[in-house]
Image (cartoon, grey):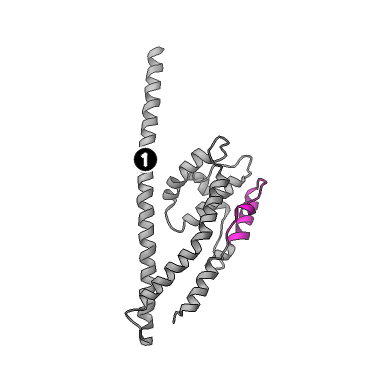
Amino acid sequence: MDIEKDSLKKQIREMTQLGYIAPEDLPSIELYMDQVTTFMDKYLSQNKRYEEDKTLTKTMINNYTKNNLLPPPEKKRYTKEHLILLIYIYYLKNVVSINDIQIMLKPLIDHYFENPEAAHSLEEIYASLYKLEQRQHFRVENSIMKTFELSERDFPGADDQYIKNLNFLSLLGYDIYMKKKIMERIIDEVAAEQAKEQEQTNGKEKKIKEENKRKK
């Protein structure tokens, strides 16, 4: 396959217009499980690589709750904040592990999920991310096109198209690999901080229990 520069630009721009859920599209009313999966599929189904791929299923949602990625619904109804967390999970699961996502989202859930005393609402945080992602589109296109141009340098001849394609894909893969490693490094640091905080909490609770026993 001969990758043409103009065609690649067109593909990139088409991909940046794939399904997104804008903050204003989030429903204000609470949804039941079937309504949640229908809502997510409505906005994100065009992101699927294959027609048979699933955007979000009941099993996925139940597993996210079991793995502490998603707080349980109240009376089987999911709030706007549940949906925001599901959007985070939807994108992150393609890059890092479920365990890593749990570490990333734990502070978000602990401090901001349905917390009226938090400095910022979960909806405000998501709106901020959404705005940044819209600005990121140009940077992504520019980065991919520069990578494409780099891959073309050493094999300009038409007979070497396979090697040029291989170089291009490998460079894209290297870029993804490096960014993923940076994410994992930061997540590991966050996990270490969380473990330290939990250890301190456990120590305080143990001390309180021992003091209560002495008083008795």
Tell me where residue 183 appears, x and y as whole percent: 39, 53
Q: Which residues are magenta?
A: 20-44
Placement of the C terminus among the 4 image quadrants: top left
Q: Is residue 69 magenta?
A: no
Tell me the chief SS of the magenta region: helix
Q: Seen from this angle, which residue lies furthest left?
A: 154
Pick the front one: 177 or 60: 177
Instruction: Using the image, determine if residue 58 lies above or below residue 5.
Output: above
Q: Is residue 21 magenta?
A: yes
Provide the residue designation for mark 1: 193
- The image shows a total of numbered marks equal to 1
Pick the front one: 135 or 78: 135
User: Crowding near pointer 1: few (<14 within 10 Å), some, many (20+)?
Assistant: few
Query: Which residue is at 51% across, 55% downward?
Result: 132
Tell me where residue 170 appears, x and y as whole percent: 36, 70
Instruction: Using the image, determine if residue 17 lies above or below residue 191.
Output: below
Query: Which residue is at 57% across, 68% downward?
Result: 51
Q: Amino acid at mark 1?
A: Glu
Query: Which residue is at 44% across, 47% downward?
Result: 104
Tell me where residue 200 appears, x and y as whole percent: 36, 31
Q: Seen from this angle, which residue lies furthest top?
A: 216
Tell me where residue 202 appears, x and y as whole percent: 38, 30
In the picture, measured across the screen, residue 124 lies left or right of residue 197, that is: right
